[in-house]
Image (spheres, grey):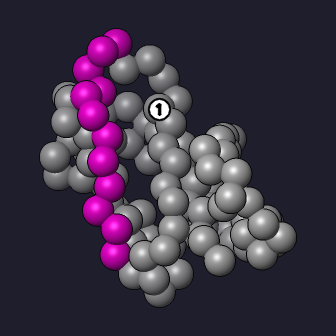
Amino acid sequence: MTHLTWVDATAVNPTNLNKLTQEDDLKPPAPVAFAGSTGRTITHNYGHTDYQVVVNPVADPAGFLGEIWFSKSANTVVVYNSGSATGNFDYVIIPHA
Protein backbone atom coordinates (compact mmCIF):
# COMPACT_ATOMS: atom_id res chain seq x y z
CA MET A 1 0.00 0.00 0.00
CA THR A 2 1.28 3.44 -0.88
CA HIS A 3 1.67 5.80 2.06
CA LEU A 4 0.99 9.51 1.67
CA THR A 5 2.68 12.02 3.93
CA TRP A 6 1.84 15.70 3.50
CA VAL A 7 4.79 17.97 4.14
CA ASP A 8 3.32 21.25 2.93
CA ALA A 9 -0.24 22.01 3.99
CA THR A 10 -0.52 24.66 1.24
CA ALA A 11 -0.32 21.89 -1.37
CA VAL A 12 -3.61 20.42 -0.12
CA ASN A 13 -6.63 21.82 -1.94
CA PRO A 14 -9.82 20.36 -3.45
CA THR A 15 -8.26 20.17 -6.93
CA ASN A 16 -5.27 18.15 -5.73
CA LEU A 17 -7.38 15.86 -3.56
CA ASN A 18 -9.69 15.16 -6.49
CA LYS A 19 -6.69 14.48 -8.73
CA LEU A 20 -5.25 12.09 -6.11
CA THR A 21 -8.43 10.03 -6.09
CA GLN A 22 -8.64 9.89 -9.90
CA GLU A 23 -5.09 9.00 -10.93
CA ASP A 24 -4.24 5.31 -11.15
CA ASP A 25 -0.54 6.04 -11.70
CA LEU A 26 -0.10 7.35 -8.16
CA LYS A 27 0.34 3.80 -6.95
CA PRO A 28 3.00 1.51 -8.38
CA PRO A 29 1.49 -1.42 -10.28
CA ALA A 30 4.20 -3.70 -8.91
CA PRO A 31 7.02 -3.31 -6.39
CA VAL A 32 9.49 -0.62 -7.46
CA ALA A 33 13.12 -1.08 -6.42
CA PHE A 34 15.90 1.43 -5.84
CA ALA A 35 18.56 1.25 -8.54
CA GLY A 36 21.37 3.41 -7.16
CA SER A 37 22.96 5.99 -9.45
CA THR A 38 21.33 4.33 -12.49
CA GLY A 39 17.96 5.46 -11.15
CA ARG A 40 14.46 4.05 -11.45
CA THR A 41 12.14 5.76 -13.96
CA ILE A 42 8.48 6.24 -13.07
CA THR A 43 6.08 7.38 -15.80
CA HIS A 44 3.23 9.69 -14.76
CA ASN A 45 2.24 11.56 -17.99
CA TYR A 46 1.26 14.85 -16.26
CA GLY A 47 2.91 16.88 -19.02
CA HIS A 48 4.64 19.28 -16.57
CA THR A 49 7.13 19.32 -13.71
CA ASP A 50 4.98 21.09 -11.12
CA TYR A 51 4.61 18.13 -8.77
CA GLN A 52 5.98 16.71 -5.55
CA VAL A 53 7.41 13.21 -5.17
CA VAL A 54 7.26 11.23 -1.93
CA VAL A 55 9.30 8.02 -1.66
CA ASN A 56 9.36 5.62 1.29
CA PRO A 57 11.42 2.42 1.55
CA VAL A 58 9.17 -0.54 2.40
CA ALA A 59 11.91 -2.52 4.18
CA ASP A 60 14.83 -1.68 6.42
CA PRO A 61 17.81 -0.88 4.14
CA ALA A 62 20.17 -1.55 7.06
CA GLY A 63 21.94 1.78 6.56
CA PHE A 64 22.76 1.14 2.88
CA LEU A 65 20.13 3.36 1.21
CA GLY A 66 22.18 6.57 1.16
CA GLU A 67 20.56 9.80 0.03
CA ILE A 68 17.51 9.90 -2.25
CA TRP A 69 17.01 12.47 -5.02
CA PHE A 70 14.85 12.95 -8.11
CA SER A 71 15.20 14.12 -11.68
CA LYS A 72 11.85 15.50 -12.86
CA SER A 73 10.64 15.80 -16.44
CA ALA A 74 7.22 16.48 -17.96
CA ASN A 75 6.09 12.84 -18.09
CA THR A 76 8.55 10.92 -15.91
CA VAL A 77 10.54 11.20 -12.72
CA VAL A 78 13.74 9.26 -12.04
CA VAL A 79 14.39 8.21 -8.43
CA TYR A 80 18.05 7.80 -7.43
CA ASN A 81 19.79 6.67 -4.25
CA SER A 82 23.45 7.06 -3.38
CA GLY A 83 23.80 3.83 -1.42
CA SER A 84 23.94 0.19 -2.42
CA ALA A 85 20.45 -0.78 -1.17
CA THR A 86 18.16 -2.08 -3.92
CA GLY A 87 15.06 -2.82 -1.85
CA ASN A 88 11.55 -1.82 -2.86
CA PHE A 89 9.90 1.54 -2.27
CA ASP A 90 6.43 3.04 -2.35
CA TYR A 91 5.86 6.40 -4.00
CA VAL A 92 3.25 9.07 -4.51
CA ILE A 93 3.37 11.83 -7.11
CA ILE A 94 1.34 14.88 -6.06
CA PRO A 95 0.54 17.36 -8.84
CA HIS A 96 0.29 21.00 -7.79
CA ALA A 97 -2.69 23.03 -8.96
Residue type, numbered disc 1: Pro
Relative height, residue 41 to residue 33 (above, below):
below
Residue 91 located left or right of residue 15: left
The residue sitting at 37% across, 20% down in the picture is 61
Residue 64 located left or right of residue 14: left
The total number of labels drawn is: 1
Residue 8 can be seen in this image: yes
The residue sitting at 60% across, 63% down in the picture is 94
Q: Tell me the quadrant of the picture where the C terminus can be found.
A: bottom right
Q: Position of residue 9 (x, y in %)?
A: 70, 51
Residue 51 located left or right of residue 86: right
Relative height, residue 83 to residue 43 (above, below):
above
Residue found farthest to the bottom: 47
**Residues shaded magenta:** 62-73
Which quadrant of the figure has residue 1? top right
Residue 28 can be seen in this image: no
Per the image, the residue denoted by label 1 is 57
Which quadrant of the figure has residue 88? top left
* Residue 45 drawn in magenta: no
Residue found farthest to the left: 37
Residue found farthest to the front: 10
The residue sitting at 16% across, 46% down in the picture is 37
Closest to the observer, 5 or 77: 5
Q: Position of residue 75 (x, y in %)?
A: 42, 79
Q: Position of residue 87 (x, y in %)?
A: 38, 31
